[in-house]
Structure formats: C-alpha cells, structure tokens
Amino acid sequence: MTPTTTAASTRPSRAQAWLLAVRPATLPAAVGPVLVGLGVAISLGTFELLPALACLAVALLLQIASNVGNDLSDFRSGVDTEARLGPPRAAALGYLSEREMVGGLGVIVALAGLVGLYLVWLGGPVILVLGVAAVISAFAYSGGPWPYGYHGLGEVFVFVFFGLVAVAGTTYLQTLTWEPLAFAAAIPVGSLITAILVVNNLRDIDTDRVAGKRTLAVMFGERGARAESDLLLAVAYAVRVALVIGGHASRGALLPLASAPLALALYRAVHAGGDPRRLNPVLKQTARLSFVFSLLLAIGLAAAGLA
C-alpha cells in the first residue's frame, strides 16, 4: 500500500494532521529542562513568574518547530517512505502539503521570536545568541545543506540544547548569573532526553541505513546503540548521587531516584529482541522517564530553597 492510498483511505482532519506534525508526545522533553532550571533558581531564592512562563513558551514552540521541520525535511530527503517503522508523518502521507507546513513553520518561529525578544530584553545579547543558535539547531538536525542528524551528531546537539542551554539558560533568566548548579543539573536531564533520540535511532537502523542517514546507531549497530542508551541512563542517576555525596547539592536532589523503576523497565525494553516496531511505545516510555526525572529533580531542588 502506498502513502497516497493510505492517505486517501484514512485521511485525518486538518487538526489531526497538524497534531501528527506537532508530535505532542515529545513536548514533555521541552518542559522538563525548564522546570529543572526553575528549580535551581528557587533553590537559590529567586523566582519570577513572567520569565518562567516565557521560557516555557519558547521551549515548547522551538520543540514544535523542530518536529514540524523534521517531518518536512525527512519527506523531502526521502528518509520517510512507506517502509517507515515509526508513527505516521503528515508530509510523507500527504496529510499536509509542503506549502502548508512551511507556512505553519513561519508562524511557529515568529511566535517563538516574539516571546524570545522579551527574554533577550531580560537577559541581554547572550540570550539572543543562544536563541538564534537554538533555532538553527532545530532546523539543521534534518534540514539544510548538511543535516547534522544524518552525520552522527544528533546526540551531541540534543544534549547541549535540551540539557545545558535549556536548564542553565532558564536559571540565568531568573538570576542573571550562570550558576554551576544549573550546569550540573543539566547533565542528567540532557542525558535522558538524548536517550529518546537513541531509542528512535535504534528502531530506525535499517531504514536509516538504506536512506543514507548515518546516525550513531547506524555506525555502531544495535549493540552500540543499546550500550549508548545504558550509558546515558547510568550517567543520569550517577551524577545526582555524586553531587549529593560531594556536598554540592541537598538531599532533595536524590528525589529523582524514585524514578529508578521506570529506568529499569526502559533498560529491559531496549534490550528485548524482536520487531523494531516494538520500540515505538518504548519511545514514549523514555520520554515519560525524562519528564518524571526532571519533575522530581525540580521539586527536590525547589524544596531545598523553600525550606
């Protein structure tokens, strides 16, 4: 069955098509780092509501822009075909035209820019530079003349922007200082969000290889991708324990350890054999773990500041 036939027989409404492109299940990955950055700020005795809401809005809008841009770019490059193992994509199935998606992207980026101007007014030129870099990163993952996601660099950029930049940047816009604790808190957050991409790439090894998309999973195979997932999980939990033992964080920073059962379930799911499609629900498991971990970490950090 071709994409055209599928689209004709099960064509969703316009709103449903946009939901496919937006990928709501991925949005907690944008929320979690902001919550942790706010938790760090509260632990230091600072919280400003309007900048917090603006950070959350920009993070969500950039995540949505990245998702829509990825949907469009993968269609244009031929990566998304009828052989796709993951959830349906709006462009590949003809649910949305290229013109519609480009127009939607323009609106999303414009909204992010408007809110971002307020954050630049608060934080100065450094926030402008980071904001522009984040927008470029969102589109360059699968678009542009040299999509870095197709050359084994996806994990690096996800860790930097969803971890270091999102967490430390949020704290900076609350305190107007670059806090070491924010960077430390960003390491486990970035690790778990990066694990989402690793599971995605593990599922798509065969189709990505055929399409010429050289992710780390394609380069190092299934065993290497599973080892990468294991390492990211280990780093996330080890960093929290090390910071508390070293006296660099309060005991509240250990609260994320309550998410360990979710991590164990994820480990087992990643290492189970079978049809790669079984990893579709595992992606949601990974996203859920990253959000729960981030939420618990944010609560633990904030509690220390409110005590």
Image (cartoon, rainbow, N blue to C red):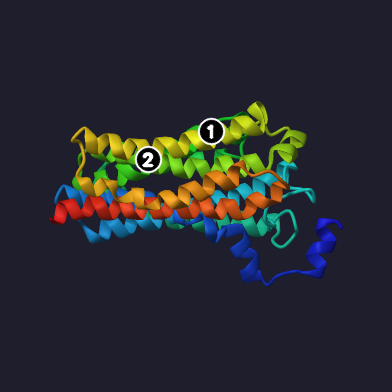
Q: Which residue is more in the foreground, 272 or 144?
A: 272
Query: The C terminus lies in which quarter of the figure?
Result: bottom left
Residue at 49 percent of width and 40 percent of height: 194
Using the image, tell me which numbered label, if any, was put on residue 237. 2
Quarter of the picture holding the N terminus = bottom right
The picture places residue 227, in percent across and down from the top left corner, at: 55, 32
Front residue (pair 5, 281)? 281
Q: Is residue 5 left or right of residue 13?
A: right
In-front residue for pair 88/119: 88
- Horizontally, is 177 left or right of 33 in the view? left
At label 1, the amino acid type is Glu
Q: Residue furthest toward the top?
A: 219
Residue 243 - label: none
> What residue do we see at 21% from left, 57% from top?
48
Q: Is residue 77 left or right of residue 264?
A: right
Amino acid type, mark 2: Tyr
Instruction: Write down the residue under mark 1.
Output: 228
Q: In this view of the protein, can residue 46 be seen by the observer?
A: no
Q: Are marks 2 and 1 in contact (CB under 8 Å)?
A: no
Q: Residue 51 location in percent, x, y?
A: 27, 55
147 sits to left or right of 205 = left
> Between disc 2 and disc 1, whose residue precedes?
1
* Crowd tier of the residue under label 2, counting other residues whose Cα lies within 10 Å: few below 14, some 14–19, many 20 or above: many
The x, y position of residue 241, in whole percent, is 30, 38
